[in-house]
Image (cartoon, coloured by chain):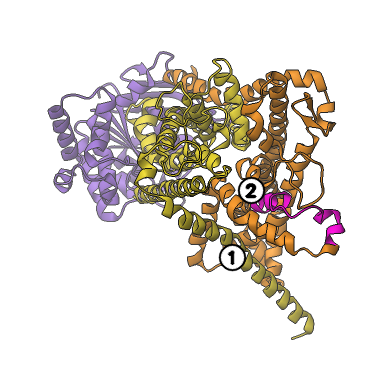
Amino acid sequence: MTSTSLRRRLVSRAAEAFCAVSVVIALLPLALILFYVVKEGIGALNADFFTKMPKPVGEAGGGMANAIAGTLILIAIAAGFAVPAGVICGIHLSEYPKSAFSTIVRFAADVLNGVPSIVVGIFVYGILVLPVKRFSALSGGVALGILMLPIVIRTTEELLRLVPAGLREGALALGATRSRAIFTVILPAALPGILTGILVALARVAGETAPLLFTAFNNRYWSTSLTQPIASLTVQVFTYAISPYEDWHRQAWAGAFLLVMMILVLSIAARLAVRRLERMNRP
Amino acid sequence: MNTTFKSRDDRGFRIGTGAIAALVLLVVLGIGFELTRQSLLSIAKFGFGFWKGTTWDPVSGEFGALPFIWGTLYSALLALLLSTPIAIGIAVFISELSPRALRQPLTYLTELLAAIPSIVYGLWGVFVLVPAVRKLELMTPESWKKIPLFKGPPLGVGMLAAALILAVMVIPLTSSVAREVLKNVPSTQREAAYALGATRWEAIRIALGFGRTGIIGAIMLGFGRALGETMAVTMVIGNNPQLSASLFAPQYTMAAVIANEFSEAADELYLHALIEIGLLLFIITIIVNLISRVMVRSRRTA
Amino acid sequence: MNEPKIHVKDFDFFYGASKVLHGISMDIPDRQVTALIGPSGCGKSTFVRSINRMNDIIPDARGTGTILIDGKNVYGRDTDVVALRRRVGMVFQKSNPFPKSIFENVAYGLRINGGGSKREMAEIVERSLRRAALWEEVKDRLHSSAFALSGGQQQRLCIARALAVDPEILLMDEPASALDPIATTKIEELIYELKSNYTIVIVTHNMQQAARVSDKTAFFMMGRLVELGDTKTMFMTPKEKMTEDYVTGRFG
């Protein structure tokens, strides 16, 4: 063994060690964040948190019932238009993959995916808030929906392409029209996977704050109206976090805990959906 | 008889789904249009001076965006500096070194890091990271304080805290794209290196070299993400528009100023100035994202 | 002899610029089995997929010439492709059951054509499964996934699915090539049963199979129809040297 080869082996070992250490370095903040969210959050999480309204400034107690309801409403609005629109768009892209139009649309979806969420907030402010001079749940939902779109489109397109061509031929050979074949055979075959994409998209927008700041805004009171400002977990956590009150800080942690739990549940659901898909596709 | 194949049912279907697909196009064009329209006042009044101005004074109606641009670029570049070696280290570890059984769990955990909402990072930043950074700043020896990089009082909030949190937030994106790139490097590349007597690391370097363009694309994708990141940054950076090289100085970013001041912007010029910042952010992120996507894809087909 | 069920005259086919079928002309008789044989890439699959215009879904594919079914032009301007495919059933090389239950697979064609009452549907599904010789094996689990069936069962399910819409013609593109010998035998027996009611065109690269199941055999080579005749004649005393070389295994 010459000494150069020893040096080279040491360099290799050192580099490999660095890579392993990187993993630890990256997972450390994850562990720390989860630790603090659980530690600080779980204590503040009680029945009041889910059922009570926020107390006036500086008073202890109260909860985030309105913000929890608000987040659910906002997500429902977002999914209500982004899921059908995104899936249909994905179908178009996978059916006509090479047309100039599809290329442009795919490009636009890519662009949209990279646009900072706060910029989407400004856009929705301009088209839905400014004209009526009022913040609204609807505008917040639309902003979140726009952020969901590219994810739903991308997953739909990719998963439809994975459906074996034989299924399409089988349906067409039985006299199905193209649209019939897609909606009765091809889309159902890809559905579990598409569902995963939708869950991932939901998890992403459920945690969004920036685009809501000047669309849904915030609301200290219970509201389910689409045309009124509405509270959300994320904006509420933000408001409480930067406030000077101890009790609000506690509630902010509780809100963060709830958000993280929601996202964990959604991503585990997504994993399960993927597993089901794999089972389905194994004939 | 000569028949080109086009089914009749196809037309309606194509046009119907196409109309919905056009919505995406409309949204992207709409963003560009709306952002321009809503910032015309500021564009007309300040012109290019807007980007060079260093004073941001809503009360006197003077708006210069340079401190925000500086803060955005500085924080994103610092984040990149911190996150790149680690992100690539993770990608290499998961795709080349890790035992098979660890691969899935590690991938899942790093993806979890990406799933945590920005606001939760922010909250953690305010109550855990910022106090820790403050301690670090207090420990800095006096002699270092003369260097511009470490000037200023130990506030905790500031550029360093922002860069740290941004770094953590972009690691999962960069490492997952880099992992994809490595996965697409033909195994013959590594085998060829081994056959020539390369060590494991030397073979990995061959793979990294083969996927070079894609890796740089992955890093740029992370950069794009860092540029637009809003909540976590605004909660820890101190929100003070100033041009400073110091890691300890509170500064401000483009996204942060929009988030903080938008709903308070009383007069139209103020609002237009904020939206013009949004417009620039939109343009920059589009450019960065497109370049990085082209780079990531170019190697995939190679 | 009666009018041919399918009449083909000077049919050419192109994928983009490359011509893959050259002036095919042949008559396919009603209620008989016609086998198309030839080495791979000879165009026999493309030809059989032209009969129900399955090639339409391939971009840049183009056919010229005439294919008549009962005297009506398959490639006419006013041909309703969807209706055509209902009349011409098809079974593919790789079985392609939908990710649905056994029942729903067979009922699919009925449903997209407007369906019927629950009872009618059940009757047709049972009849189709019986005709495909699958009923006895699946009658107790009609609502479990089609993927739970074996390869041979899946292929017979696809045949049942095609039969359920009551086609007149059944096209089979190497229906047994992915199956084991026992499953293959079952499919061949099935073909024999079915020919009293259907006009069957089967593509196969297995010459014993062609000899066993078909009445007529057509030999394709490099996109051309070399010879067409009674199966017995084709295998015993073919007219063309090329056919003889192929059926005796000298190439291909």
Q: Which chain is yellow?
A: A
Q: Which chain is orange?
A: B
The span shown in magenta is B144-167
What quarter of the picture does the N terminus of chain C occupy? Answer: top left
Q: Label 1 is placed on what type of residue?
A: Val
- Where residue B137 sits, quadrant-wise, is bottom right
Is residue C27 visible in the rendered structure shown here?
A: yes
Q: Secondary structure at mark 1?
A: helix
Chain bearing tag 1 is: A
Rounded to the nearest angstrom, the CA distance separating label 1 from label 2 is 29 Å
Per the image, the residue denoted by label 2 is B300
For the residues labelled 1 and 2, say whether their Cβ atoms are less than 8 Å apart: no
Q: Which chain is purple?
A: C
**At 63% across and 31% down in the image, what residue appears?**
A119
Q: Position of residue A162 (x, y in %)?
A: 46, 42
> Residue extending furthest bottom?
A1
